[in-house]
Image (cartoon, grey):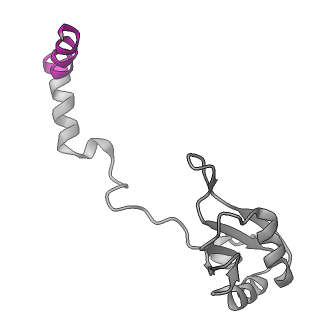
């Protein structure tokens, strides 16, 4: 018996619009009335020292997730309206699936390195040393 991936089974939710005061225990307490929670992930902004304002929450059962969406989408938590949807898988950015060596610039740089030893890089490094 195989288990469906989390995002395709509609058990994982995206929760956006979180106030900086929201913690994992706050989210757990807010969503626990809808059913057992399997996992909560709150991505952190380490430079700022706070979370990024959104979280992912996974229920054990997809019916519980649907109930949470119905009841919590648009609800307020610490004075901010929440956005609650089924989590979507990451989408690739345009051009990110191209190989590094598929661009003309890469081949030109490699040709310069082969033909002139260090080519432009050596000239630039020497210029920095002399200044």
**Residue 117 appears in the picture as rendered:** no
Q: Which residue lies furthest to the bottom in this view?
A: 70
The quarter of the displayed image where residue 39 is located = bottom right
**Residue 32 appears in the picture as rendered:** yes
Q: Which residue lies furthest to the front in this view?
A: 79
In the image, 23 versus 73, the foreground residue is: 23
The quarter of the displayed image where residue 52 is located = bottom right
**Residue at left 70%, top 75%?**
78
The quarter of the displayed image where residue 62 is located = bottom right
**Residue at left 85%, top 81%?**
35
Specify the segment rendered in magenta. Answer: 114-130
Q: Does the magenta stretch include residue 125?
A: yes
- Predominant SS of the magenta segment: helix
**In the picture, which quadrant includes the C terminus?**
top left
The number of numbered discs placed on residues in the rendered structure image is 0
Q: In this view, does 97 lie to the left or right of 60?
A: left
**Residue at left 69%, top 91%?**
70
**Residue at left 15%, top 22%?**
120
Above or below, 110 relative to 75? above
The location of residue 4, given as percent across then percent down, is: 70, 72
Q: Is residue 34 left or right of residue 5?
A: right
């Amino acid at each position: 018996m195989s288990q469906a991936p989390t995002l395709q089974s509609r058990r994982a939710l995206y929760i956006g619009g979180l106030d900086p005061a929201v913690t994992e225990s706050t989210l757990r307490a807010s969503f626990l009335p809808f059913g057992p929670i399997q996992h909560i992930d709150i991505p952190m902004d380490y430079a700022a020292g706070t979370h990024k304002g959104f979280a992912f929450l996974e229920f054990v059962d997809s019916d519980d997730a649907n109930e949470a969406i119905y009841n919590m989408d648009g609800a307020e938590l610490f004075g901010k309206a929440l956005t609650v949807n089924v989590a979507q898988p990451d989408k690739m950015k345009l051009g990110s699936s191209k190989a590094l060596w598929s661009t003309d610039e890469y081949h030109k740089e490699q040709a310069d390195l082969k033909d002139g030893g260090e080519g432009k890089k050596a000239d630039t490094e020497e210029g920095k040393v002399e200044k």
